[in-house]
Amino acid sequence: MKAVTVLFRTCMILGCIMLFTQPGLAAKKKSKQADKDPHTIVTKEANTIDELVEMLDEKKCGSCHPKIYREWERSWHAKSVVSPGSLKGVHNFIAIGLPKEWNKPLTKAELLKCLDCHAPIANYASEELAVKIGNMIVTAHKEKDNPAGKKAKKALEKLNVGCVSCHNLKAISVARGLRGDPKKGAIYGPTGANSGGAHKTIQTVDITRSVFCMQCHGKYTAPDGETIQCNTLSGSFQNAYQNNGGTETCQDCHMEKSGKSGRKSHLFPGGHDLDMVKKGLGLKVNFAQYRHLPGKIKGVKNDKAWVPSAVVTAFVENKAGHRIPDG
Ligand code: HEC
Ligand code: HEC
Ligand code: HEC
Ligand code: HEC
Ligand code: HEC
């Protein structure tokens, strides 16, 4: 009897201790988690390009996802502002289009008509910083052989379609009406895998679907209703591929699993990758042999002889999920 009472008392005491300590512990745990989230993604308005990049730096992600980081680094997504084509195009928009064609000042809203796809993290730039980025793009292209242009390009290299662009900013925006805005600081992924406290992970099926890619690789409607289109790829994917029974997604063809890990590759090969281009082309050749009638072809030495000839018919088949080339 006595033993039971002692046990009971111990339980009471322990219970009390637990009651008092539990909320404290929970609060402590929570603040630790909150400390860690900003470590990976900070989401406030940035006033300098360094501040902007520091907030959403892919290198931070690379410390725990090194293989994916190395693949991404080699992809065209990693140079989506400074690639020669894009830099020139956005320069023309800012230096010629806005002032000369449309008579509009350079503002963040105008710049986002390009950078919302070419560098979505520009959404976190202050108005002043956005204008500064626009001017840097002009300098980087116009003065590409001078130190000023090189310096501007070096800074702009850090703007791209990075991890956070896809895994937060654009992750669920294909169904904004249904899902709302992405949660600040969270990482959206295909499985919602537990990151052990590194970041809050939220599962979404959206990122595994073609529409996720099509929001950038297709027609774009800016908040003011203006439409922009860099490429017609999504249109032909829908109309010429899906409507004819094509079942593969953009991810199936462009993120083919790599290595033993079975993880989806982040190299995103496309028109700049010879192996990928070969995959897209099917070649069928018909070969018909015959002889020309003698005396019918001018310039042949012996005009009495038969002239061996051939007709070669080549069928080039497009095996990609859309028209090629594009852009
Ligand atoms: C809907 C998202 C989106 C918007 C908005 C957008 N782009 Fe693009 N842009 C892309 C994508 C995706 C590609 C790559 C196309 C490809 O490789 O098939 C691209 C490619 C380009 C290229 C060709 C690059 C090369 O290497 O050949 C230029 C130039 C370009 N964009 C300029 C602009 C300009 C200027 C604006 C703003 C007026 C703009 N883009 C707005 C998504 C967009
Ligand atoms: C252009 C968009 C895009 C960019 C940029 C991008 N990802 Fe992804 N990532 C995806 C998509 C899409 C998937 C899911 C593919 C699927 O399962 O269909 C994915 C999957 C993943 C996964 C889960 C992989 C697996 O197979 O379990 C991890 C981890 C990941 N990404 C990390 C990163 C990191 C780190 C970066 C930056 C270095 C990055 N991603 C950049 C689009 C992107
Ligand atoms: C301290 C280590 C650490 C850092 C830093 C980190 N992650 Fe992760 N992340 C993990 C772990 C652990 C997992 C779960 C196992 C896995 O999928 O690799 C994970 C999972 C993921 C997934 C897969 C989620 C899913 O639904 O399958 C994505 C996407 C991802 N991380 C993106 C990022 C991005 C983007 C960054 C940078 C902003 C980042 N991670 C920074 C450790 C980290
Ligand atoms: C945030 C916008 C964005 C998203 C989302 C996005 N892309 Fe891109 N992607 C771009 C831009 C911009 C470029 C062009 C970079 C350049 O050439 O300067 C590009 C380039 C590419 C290229 C290289 C094209 C070439 O010419 O070699 C491929 C392939 C590609 N993307 C596939 C995908 C796939 C597949 C998805 C979906 C899983 C996807 N992208 C999601 C913006 C995006
Ligand atoms: C059935 C496989 C397949 C599907 C599905 C597919 N692609 Fe492609 N894609 C290819 C191949 C192969 C190429 C290389 C052919 C070439 O550029 O000559 C390519 C090229 C590209 C390029 C480079 C275009 C250029 O002109 O250089 C981009 C960007 C791209 N794809 C994006 C996408 C997006 C976005 C989707 C989904 C809407 C998609 N692809 C669906 C196979 C596919």
Image (spheres, rainbow, N blue to C red):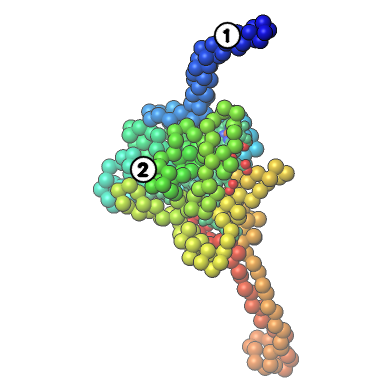
Where 144 sits versus 314, above or below? above
Query: In the structure shown, which secondary structural element does the residue marked by tag 2 occupy?
Result: helix
Q: Which mark is residue 111?
A: 2
Q: Is residue 132 visible?
A: no
Q: Which mark is residue 164?
A: none
Judged from this view, the residue extending furthest toward the left is 103
* Sequence-first tag of 2 and 1: 1
Residue in the foreground of this view, choosing between 153 and 214? 214
Name the residue rendered at 60%, 54% in the picture: 252
Residue in the foreground of this view, choosing between 66 and 261? 261
Q: Which mark is residue 13?
A: 1
Residue in the foreground of this view, choosing between 181 and 106? 181
Name the residue rendered at 65%, 38% in the picture: 67
Where 107 sits versus 245, above or below? above
Check disc 1 and give the amino acid type: Ile
Report the side of 207 relative to 11 (left or right).
left
